[in-house]
Amino acid sequence: MLARYSVRPAWWTIAHASFATALIIGVVTACSDDDNPVGPGGSIVVSDFQLKPGTESGPLAVATFTAQDADSARVWYTAAGGEPRATPFVPVADGAAQIVVPGLEPTTQYDMHVEARAGADSGASQSSSFTTQELPSALQSVSFQMSTGTYTSGYILTEIVASDSTLYAVAFDSAGGLAWYRHFPDFKQILDLQQQPNGHFTIYLGGSTGWQPVNGEYAEFTVAGDITHEWKLPDQYFVDGHDIRFAMQDTAVVAAYLFGYDLRSMDMTGHGGSADSLVAVHKIIRLSPGGEATVLFDAIDRWTLDDWVSKPLTGLGDLGHANSLDFDSDGNIIVSWRNLGAITKHDGTTGEVIWQLGGTKSDVTIEGDPLDGFSGQHHARVLPDNHLMVYDNGTNHDPTETRAVEYAIDAASKTATFVRDFKRPTATFTTFLGSAQRLPNGHTLVGFGNVSVLTEFDANGNVVADGTKMDGGNGSIFYRAVWIPALGNR
């Protein structure tokens, strides 16, 4: 079913949720009495404890168990000669729970047990051994080769089409080592992969790069590799794989916002094409979990081919090339349009354009930018204090150079004031791909995807970490490379 617009959704913040059946991250090292392993026994009985590998994913263990009368539980695990470590506590509902232990070493034996609690009461399962699987051969030579420092503690999430010519979602630790993967054996296209507010991941599965008549969808999956939902558009639209963002209400996903497109016949004789060329025209679409699609905005209602600022990199069949979508702090939507050299803000309910930054129909003035704006941009993300971060590929700069650039947006005066930009010490140019992200510690992570380089800058623009994504002896390009604090629920 297709609607033109709907009533305003009741979401203005993206919740960071936790669930009773939790897919949890990360590890903590025992460092206090509360963090010492609890042995078997206690007033709470833990039973049916089982360990298994993930679904096309690893290196990790999936623990399932029952713990009647418990309200929370965690898994302790120890490798031979190592210190005991534990997952965070997760809720236990109706006596049953599942806990995922990711970030393990491959082909390593661990002793594991469950500790369950309810107030001051506790109990533990018997210990069980679990040996992690070997990394797939296609991933054994994949890493970030660090030339400077290490990244902020957490994980770097990205994709790779590895040496077996199939797609992997991968996460690297702060030193560049592979920490986690999920294999998608039937696909070989790198586009959007991200962690959503519910702790799940979404990945585009299809063959389109944003304009071809090729079907695709988004898979939503857990850190254990289990696919929980498939996000598809009605048959009249192709799914664009550049971005998808979840809107949350409490712990529930109420909608996904993404791009779809259809093909229109257009006269492109003035642009190097034929009189009846097929051109992809993008829409901003709100998609319910049940599959109801609401078109919020259609690019053809605002722009024509004469509004091109940067021609498509391949072919001519793409009017706008929408390549990022984000929520502003007021619940409205920020979209980047590569071919139009524009970033737009849209009403989150009606899709109406509130302002446009860059491009032929810009009504926001850029002030103080030494390069007079961005071009061929790939990624726009909202920062606190009404700031906007843009990965500026720099297609039309002279000389061409790629940077991340930050603007302070004043909607009342319709100005975007240059705050700072971030460039590598050696001038770097990426014709396509890339990402820019502000980290919680104030650093900025910039992914120069086309040249396989990920650089972290401090608040003053100094390089604190720099690495090249490698597959064997060769650089491995990436669509985006983004920092996440944990591999499961936040």
Image (cartoon, rainbow, N blue to C red):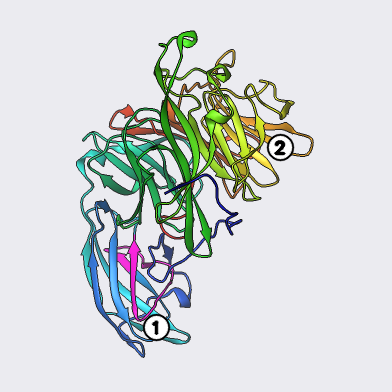
> Residue 229 in magenta?
no
Most extreme residue toward the bottom is 43
Residue position marked by numbered label 1 in the rendering = 70
Q: Left or right of 391: which side holds 105?
A: left
359 versus 126 height, above or below: above
For label 2, the SS is strand
Q: Quadrant of residue 215?
A: top left
Residue position marked by numbered label 2 in the rendering = 408
Q: Nearer the viewer, mark 1 or mark 2?
A: 2
Q: Report whether residue 262 is seen.
A: yes
Q: Position of residue 434 (x, y in %)?
A: 48, 32
Q: Position of residue 201 (x, y in %)?
A: 40, 51
Q: Position of residue 404 (x, y in %)?
A: 58, 31
Q: Report whether residue 434 is seen.
A: no
407 versus 25 height, above or below: above
Q: Provide the residue span drawn in magenta.
A: 77-101
Mark 2 belongs to which amino acid? Answer: Ala
Residue at 73% from the left image edge and 32% from the top image edge: 417
402 versus 220 height, above or below: above
Most extreme residue toward the right is 413
Q: Quadrant of residue 100?
A: bottom left
Mark 1 belongs to which amino acid? Answer: Ala
Q: Left or right of 44: which side holds 243?
A: right
Residue at 39% from the left image edge and 78% from the top image edge: 93
Nearest the viewer among 234 and 404 is 234
